[in-house]
Image (tube, rainbow, N blue to C red):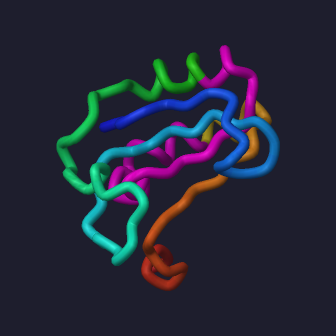
Amino acid sequence: MRILDIIEGTSVDGPGLRTAIYFAGCLHKCPGCHNPQSWPMDAGKEISTECLINMIEDAGADVTLTGGDPVYQAAEIMPLCRELKRKGRNIWLYTGFRYEELMA
């Protein structure tokens, strides 16, 4: 997965203290975006699912997936989310897609 940053112990990306994972890449280019440096799909660095899970478990907090738009890496985030849910983590995901677009 292409990751821009990982912030442990944040309280601004969901309820309580969380680990926020900022994914690279976004084609929405929303006006007023607070994170336009996340738009390039090749930004950040490659991090494996296993590495992310270990970091999240070490932090011991729930998780927020943001970016960029994590949904552009859906094939990679699905196994991550399944494993985090199995471990009892609450997951929030910020996206610019509409529900109907995701379901299509």
The image shows a total of numbered marks equal to 0
Q: Is residue 17 above or below residue 30?
A: above
Q: Is residue 99 above or below residue 66?
A: below
Residue 59 lies in the magenta stretch: yes
Residue at figure coordinates x 36%, y 26% from the top left: 47
Residue 100 coordinates in the image, percent (x, y): 50, 85
Residue 17 coordinates in the image, percent (x, y): 76, 36
- Choose between 28 and 101: the one closer to the eye: 28
- Choose between 35 and 69: the one closer to the eye: 35
Image-based side of 84 in relation to 90, left or right: left
Residue at figure coordinates x 35%, y 50% from the top left: 73
Q: Main secondary structure of the magenta part?
A: helix
Q: Is residue 85 above or below residue 95?
A: above
Residue 78 lies in the magenta stretch: yes
Residue at figure coordinates x 69%, y 29% from the top left: 9
Image-based side of 22 in relation to 13, left or right: left
Residue at figure coordinates x 29%, y 70% from the top left: 29
Q: What residue span does the magenta drawing correspond to?
A: 56-81
Image-based side of 27 in relation to 47, left or right: left
Among the 4 quarters of the image, the one containing residue 63: top right
Among the 4 quarters of the image, the one containing residue 22: top left
Q: Is residue 5 above or below residue 39?
A: above
Position of the N terminus by quadrant = top left
Residue 92 coordinates in the image, percent (x, y): 65, 53
